[in-house]
C-alpha cells in the first residue's frame, strides 16, 4: 500500500479517546502519517502530551492561530520554544493572519504572527500558515511578513483556496501549498486550475479535520483524516499521475518541507 500523509489536522479538538479512535481509523484507511497543529499554547501542549497515546506516526506543530492571537505573550513564546524542541515536533503552526474571520484587531494578530515567525527564524524551523477562506489582503500581509525575513522562514500554506496570483506569491517565497477537500468541490473549478499549475514538488494534501472541508462526496458529513486517500487520488487525476505516485509525491514533499518528520 502506498504511503499516505495528511499534512494538517487538529487532533487536540477531540477528547483523547476520540482522537485515538480517529487516528486508528485513519491508519486502517492507509494514512500512515498525520501532522496535527495546535492553535494556542494549551492545544499545542495537549498534542505533545498525547503523542505516546496517539502513536509514532503522529507529528506535531505548535503555535498561535490568528483566532487565538490575544493569547500571545513573551512567556507564551518562551513556552512554545521549549515545546518545539520536544521529539516529533516538526515546526510552528498553525500560525498566520485572518483579516476576514479573525476575532482580534489586526495589530494583535500581526504581533502574534511576527512573534511566531521570529521563533521559526531563531530555531530554523518551518512554519504552517493559516490559509483557508482568506482574502487577497490577508495573504498579501502574511507574504510581506515572511518576505521581510529574506528567505530565512519557509514552510507551507494550509487549506490554500485562493487564486493563481496569490499562489504565485507564496511559491516565489519558497512555500508549498496544501489543499484540502475544497479542491474536489463541484464549484471550485478555479481552485483546480490553480492546483494544476503548482509545481509538483510544492503540493501537499490535508483534510484539516475536524474542520468542515471533506471531499465533495462526503459534504455534509463529519470530516476525517481517512479522506486523505480520496484527496490524494483526486490530486493524481488532476495532475495525470498514478495514485501511488501521487501519494509518494505528497509524502516526499511533506518530508522536504518538514524535515523533522523523519525523526
Image: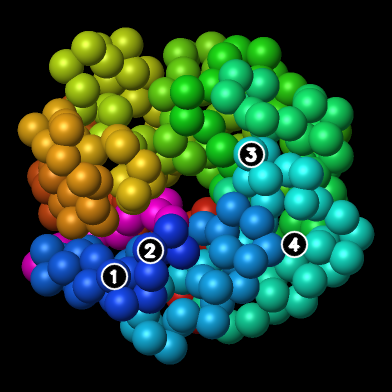
The residue labelled by disc 4 is 124
Q: Which residues are magenta?
A: 1-10
> What separation in Å lies between label 3 and label 4 (alpha carbons)?
25 Å
CA gap, disc 3 and disc 1: 24 Å
Please state if 30 lies on the left or on the right of 109 as rendered.
left
- Mark earlier in primary sequence (2, 3): 2
Quarter that holds the N terminus? bottom left
Label 3, on which residue? Answer: 67
Give the label on residue 14, or none. Answer: 2
Q: Position of residue 205 (x, y in %)?
A: 33, 45
Report crowding for label 3: few under 14, some 14 to 19, many 20 or more residues within 10 A (C-alpha).
some
Viewer can see residue 247: no
Against 59, residue 170 (above or below) is above
Give above or below for 92 relative to 167.
Answer: below
- Residue drawn at (85%, 29%), measured in percent from left and top? 107
34 or 154: nearer the eye? 34
Question: Which residue is rendered at x = 46% and y = 75% of the image?
Answer: 262
* Sooner in the amino-acid sequence: mark 3 or mark 1: 1
Quadrant housing residue 159? top left
| Front label number (2 vs 4) | 2
Which residue occupies 56% across, 38% down?
Answer: 130
Say whether marks 2 and 1 touch (CB < 8 Å): yes
Amino acid at each position: 500500500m502506498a504511503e499516505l500523509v495528511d499534512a494538517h489536522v487538529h487532533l487536540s479538538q477531540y477528547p483523547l479517546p476520540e482522537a485515538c479512535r480517529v487516528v486508528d481509523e485513519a491508519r486502517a484507511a492507509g494514512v500512515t502519517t498525520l501532522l496535527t497543529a495546535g492553535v494556542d499554547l494549551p492545544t499545542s501542549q495537549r498534542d505533545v502530551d498525547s503523542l505516546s497515546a496517539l502513536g509514532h506516526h503522529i507529528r506535531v506543530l505548535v503555535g498561535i492561530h490568528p483566532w487565538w492571537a490575544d493569547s500571545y505573550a513573551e512567556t507564551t513564546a518562551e513556552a512554545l520554544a521549549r515545546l518545539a524542541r520536544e521529539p516529533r515536533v516538526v515546526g510552528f503552526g498553525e500560525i498566520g493572519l485572518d483579516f476576514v474571520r479573525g476575532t482580534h484587531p489586526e495589530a494583535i494578530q500581526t504581533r502574534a504572527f511576527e512573534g511566531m515567525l521570529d521563533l521559526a527564524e531563531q530555531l530554523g524551523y518551518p512554519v504552517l500558515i493559516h490559509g483557508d477562506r482568506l482574502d487577497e489582503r490577508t495573504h498579501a500581509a502574511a507574504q510581506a511578513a515572511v518576505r521581510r525575513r529574506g528567505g530565512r522562514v519557509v514552510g507551507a500554506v494550509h487549506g490554500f483556496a485562493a487564486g493563481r496570483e496569490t499562489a504565485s506569491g507564496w511559491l516565489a517565497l519558497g512555500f508549498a501549498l496544501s489543499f484540502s477537500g475544497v479542491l474536489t468541490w463541484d464549484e471550485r473549478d478555479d481552485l483546480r486550475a490553480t492546483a494544476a499549475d503548482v509545481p509538483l514538488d510544492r503540493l501537499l494534501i490535508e483534510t484539516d479535520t475536524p474542520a468542515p472541508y471533506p471531499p465533495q462526496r462526503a459534504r455534509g458529513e463529519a470530516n476525517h483524516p481517512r479522506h486523505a486517500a480520496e484527496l490524494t487520488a483526486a490530486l493524481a487525476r488532476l495532475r495525470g499521475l498514478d495514485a501511488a505516485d501521487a501519494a509518494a509525491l505528497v509524502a516526499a514533499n511533506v518530508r522536504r518541507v518538514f524535515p523533522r518528520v523523519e525523526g
